[in-house]
Amino acid sequence: MNSAASAAPAAACAARLEPPRGTNPPPCGPPEAPTVRQATTWFTRRPDGLTGEESLRLKELRYGFPELADTAQHAREFAKIMARLDSERRLPGWIEAAEHAELPVIQSFARNLRHDLDAVVQGLTSPCNSGVVEGRVTDLKTVKRHMAGRAGFPLLRKRVLLVAASCRTPQVTTPMEP
């Protein structure tokens, strides 16, 4: 039999097995492992802010890596304490639970919080903070970075003064409702 004649049926068979042009073949095997950034986002975002696929992938991560689930739970509890500005009441209990966790990173964080507990409580309960100052410093560093090596001091000075005069309104942090 002619090799050209036998190649034609094989090509026709292969063409039927391939997906149509312009479509992606269905994924084979397990899903691709998430990046660190994706996993961190899934663990730190509020559950109602996740898509269905993200929720499913997060559940798989928690099931496959229980220590990640425990770490995320401790982080979520600490975030609630920070957001509600009620560290005087809830922080000592959180530190106690974190020190007994089987997670070295969480234990170390809790020990360091306990060393400077008064300052931590003050920082987490006070509605006053240095956020506005930090925002201004960030703005100035951005201008400095943009201007590095491009112009002399007079232009840098003008840009810094323009940023300083911009209308960024300070916002006072208020506790969330429980």
Image (cartoon, helix red, strand yellow):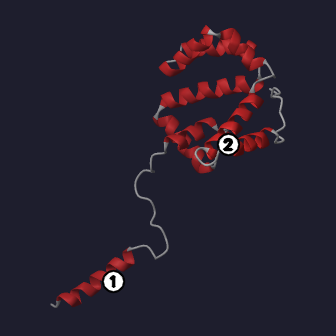
Quadrant in which the N terminus appears: bottom left
Residue 116, by quadrant, is top right
Q: Is residue 74 left or right of residue 155?
A: left
Q: Secondary structure at mark 2?
A: helix
Q: Is residue 88 left or right of residue 53?
A: right
Residue 176 badge? none
Q: Is residue 115 visible?
A: yes
Residue depth check, mark 2 versus mark 1: number of the one nearer the observer: 2
Q: Where residue 161 sits: x, y (%)?
A: 78, 40
* Most foreground residue, 9 or 83: 83
Position of the C terminus, as image quadrant, is: top right
Q: Which residue is mark 2?
A: 143
* Residue appearing at x 56%, y 18% in the figure: 109
Look at the picture and state if 170 lies above or below 158.
above
Mark 2–mark 1 CB contact (< 8 Å) = no
Q: Residues within 10 Å of mark 2 (few under 14, many from 20)?
A: some
